[in-house]
C-alpha cells in the first residue's frame, strides 16, 4: 500500500508535504483502516528512500491533525474519525484542487488553459 506513495522531486512542494498528503488520502479513502499500524519511521524512510527525519515529521503532523496516534515504543496507529467520510473527501478534494491550481499558476499557465485542460481530462 505504501509503495503507491510517489515523490515528485521536480515540484516545489516539499517532500514531507507530498508524503503527508498521500498518507492522508490513504487514511480518508479507507485504504488504511482505523486501528491499523503505519510502517515504522525507518521502514517507510527506507522504502521511499528519504531521510527518516522526514517521515518522523510527517507522522508528527498527522498526529497533531488527529489522524494517527503515535505511541512511543509501539508505533503509529490510525485513529477513528468523528468526521463523516464525505466531509473528509470534500476536504481532501479542496486541498488537491488548490494544490493543482497553485502549481499550474507557478508554471505560468493561464486560468483558461487550466480550466479547459481540466474539463477535457474530466470528460475522458
Image (cartoon, grey):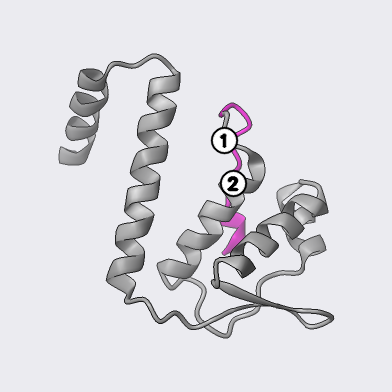
| Above/below status of 117 relative to 4 | above
Residue 19 lies, in percent from the top left, at 60, 51
In the image, which residues are magenta?
1-11
Residue 16 lies, in percent from the top left, at 65, 47
From the viewer's side, name the closer residue of 68 and 124.
68
Residue under label 2: 17
Residue under label 1: 13
* Label 1 secondary element: loop
81 lies left or right of 63: left
Residue at (40, 81) in percent of width and height? 82
Residue 70 lies, in percent from the top left, at 71, 76
Q: Quadrant of residue 35?
A: bottom right
The answer to whether the residue labelled 2 contacts the one labelled 1, judged by CB atoms less than 8 Å apart, is yes
Residue at (58, 35) in percent of width and height? 8
Q: Which quadrant: the C terminus?
A: top left
| Above/below status of 79 relative to 39 | below
Residue at (45, 20) in percent of width and height? 106
The mark tally for this picture is 2
102 lies left or right of 76: left
Q: Quadrant of residue 74?
A: bottom right
Residue at (72, 56) in percent of width and height? 57
* Label 2 secondary element: helix
| Above/below status of 72 relative to 29 | below
Tell whether position 7 is magenta.
Answer: yes
Residue 5 lies, in percent from the top left, at 58, 52
Amino acid at each position: 500500500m505504501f509503495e503507491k506513495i510517489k515523490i515528485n522531486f521536480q515540484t516545489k512542494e516539499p517532500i514531507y508535504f507530498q508524503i503527508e498528503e498521500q498518507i492522508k488520502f490513504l487514511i480518508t479513502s479507507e485504504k488504511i483502516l482505523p486501528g491499523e499500524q503505519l510502517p515504522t519511521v525507518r521502514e517507510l524512510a527506507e522504502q521511499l528512500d528519504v531521510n527518516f527525519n522526514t517521515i518522523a515529521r510527517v507522522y508528527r503532523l498527522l498526529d497533531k491533525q488527529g489522524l494517527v496516534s503515535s505511541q512511543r515504543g509501539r508505533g503509529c496507529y490510525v485513529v477513528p474519525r468523528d468526521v463523516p467520510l464525505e466531509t473528509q473527501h470534500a476536504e481532501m478534494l479542496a486541498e488537491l484542487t488548490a494544490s493543482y491550481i497553485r502549481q499550474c499558476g507557478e508554471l505560468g499557465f493561464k486560468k483558461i488553459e487550466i480550466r479547459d485542460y481540466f474539463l477535457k481530462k474530466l470528460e475522458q
